[in-house]
Image: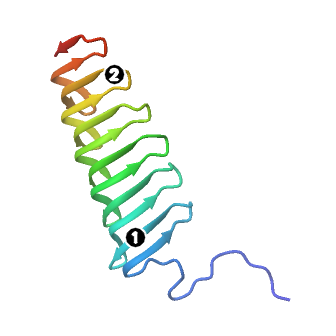
Amino acid sequence: MAAARQGVLQRRDPPGRPPQDGRGKLLFKDGSYYEGEFADGEIAGEGCRHWAATGNTYSGRFVLGEPQGHGVMTYGAGGCYEGAMSRGMREGHGCLVDQDGNVYRGSFHSNKQHGRGHMAFRNGDTYDGDWVRGQRQGHGVLRCADGSTYEL
């Protein structure tokens, strides 16, 4: 009688290994996955990646395994982002809907609102103006739902 063994059978070209070129699906041990294009054995091209730990899902372009270019990130905690990505971060122009329903359209740098942008708050207020590292800063106009306007 053979002894029971646990583990993974290692072969020269194990199943589940990413294809060198073309389309395929790669499953990660933590339950995450990528489905899409591969080039030279790397995640590259159009595809969809799901991270099991956070529940985040990204559909769009990948370079060297990272979101790069235009895509859509849906956050497991709520909210989504559509726009430019660089090395897996929001970078450039895009639209972010946060988990509370506030909508920001404008520039991003290092994953944060940075530069010119427009925020429409769930309560009806809006802000058009400058942002620095995710905070309103510099010149801008706040229009409140009650009709009042503040120029900053």
Q: Single out the mark in the foreground, 2 or 1.
A: 2
Choose the circle earlier in sequence order: 2 or 1: 1
Q: Which residue is mark 1?
A: 36
Specify the amino acid type for callout 2: Gly
In the picture provided, is 127 more to the left or to the right than 28? left
Q: Residue at x 25, y 37 (%)?
A: 105
- The residues bearing labels 2 and 1 have C-alpha atoms spaced at a distance of 40 Å
Quarter of the image containing the C terminus? top left
Residue 106 at x, y percent in the picture: 21, 38
The label shown at residue 99 is none
113 above or below 52?
Answer: above
* 72 vs 86, nearest the viewer: 72
* 26 vs 100, nearest the viewer: 100
Residue 81 at x, y percent in the picture: 34, 45
Q: Quadrant of residue 19?
A: bottom left
Specify the amino acid type for callout 1: Gly
Q: Quadrant of residue 24?
A: bottom left
Q: Is residue 87 visible?
A: no
Residue 80 at x, y percent in the picture: 39, 44
| Other-residue count near label 1 (Cα within 10 Å), few / some / many at <14 / 14–19 / ≥20 | many
